[in-house]
Image (cartoon, grey):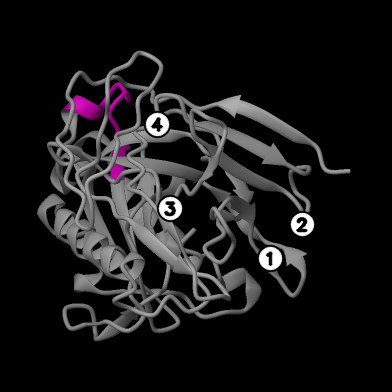
Amino acid sequence: MATARVLTVANTTSTAAVATTSCFLSKATPFFPKNGAPYRTSLCFTRRLASSSTTKRSFTCRAIYNPQVQIKEEGQPETLDYRVFFLDGSGKKVSPWHDIPLHLGDNIFNFIVEIPKESSAKMEVATDEPHTPIKQDTKKGKLRYYPYNINWNYGLLPQTWEDPSFANSEVEGAFGDNDPVDVVEIGERQRKIGEILKVKPLGALAMIDEGELDWKIVAISLDDPKASLVNDVDDVEKHFPGTLTAIRDWFRDYKIPDGKPANKFGLGNKAANKDYALKVITETNESWAKLVKRSIPAGELSLL
């Protein structure tokens, strides 16, 4: 029988700011954490999912800021059944991809950890499963591992999507990889699977994986001791010397031990600056908005 463990996941930094509600499709009741102060996102949607009958199930704009978000582990780690679900304050399952807000204001964003630094299990949000839990990726029925540890915390930006129907003219015409945008968080601490961090972007690498564009946003958590010192790619090179090259080389080479070719990078094989990273985040957030509004076919992706 599968086991379940529920762990509280709180933001590692606090904020006193309360953003105004701005839902594209409808106004909705905000999420109230236990302290009673309402938090609202800058972008969220009412989503209507068609069932097999003619009735439709409505989903209101769930503005979960995450001070009381919990994670619930089901199954045992490093098994095919292992899942990390996200729960709201009432204990209902929510999607880390769709329901955790992206924007926190002042170019600060929520980042969800999938793979802790110095680990090798290839964990990822299951974009094709209800509530999109985190699971370990598989290939031919076997659990996937990187050939060596990843040296940074790795995960996704919620409410982003790399549209596989969009050819990016700035990056060799490559199409999106059909996933949320990836983040490489360079802070000193090893984080936990499912932890939600406030991060600021510092740059962007345009990885091309078998012809697909797979953005890597380089960022740092606001609670890192060096966070105040780094605000752009030049600062990364100054305070984390060699890190940008190490990130590029790691993602370029990690498939080679499996007999695959090295990945390539666009934009001159270098990390673009913070402004470009913010542009990528904005564009992929807009693509996600079209996806959840069903302006773009979802295919096998779960919008629940």
Task: State how far apart marks 3 and 2 are (Cα).
Answer: 21 Å
Above-or-below relation of 287 to 227? below
Q: 10 Å neighbourhood of mark 2: few (<14), some, or many (≥20)?
A: some
Whether residue 152 is visible here, answered yes or no, is: no
Q: Mark 4 sits on what residue?
A: 66
- Point out residue 144 in the picture as x, y percentages from the top left corner: 68, 61
- Point out residue 236 in the picture as x, y percentages from the top left corner: 22, 41
Q: Are marks 3 and 2 in contact (CB under 8 Å)?
A: no
Q: Mark 2 sits on what residue?
A: 80
Task: State how far apart marks 4 and 3 are (Cα).
Answer: 13 Å
- Point out residue 256 in the picture as x, y percentages from the top left corner: 56, 72
Task: State how far apart marks 1 and 3 are (Cα).
Answer: 20 Å
Q: Secondary structure at mark 2?
A: loop
Closer to the chain start, of discs 1 and 3, is 3
Q: Is residue 117 left or right of residue 222?
A: right
Q: Which mark is residue 97?
A: 3
Closer to the chain start, of discs 4 and 1, is 4
Toward the front, the furthest residue is 54
The amino acid marked with disc number 4 is Asn
Closer to the chain start, of discs 2 and 4, is 4
Toward the right, the furthest residue is 1
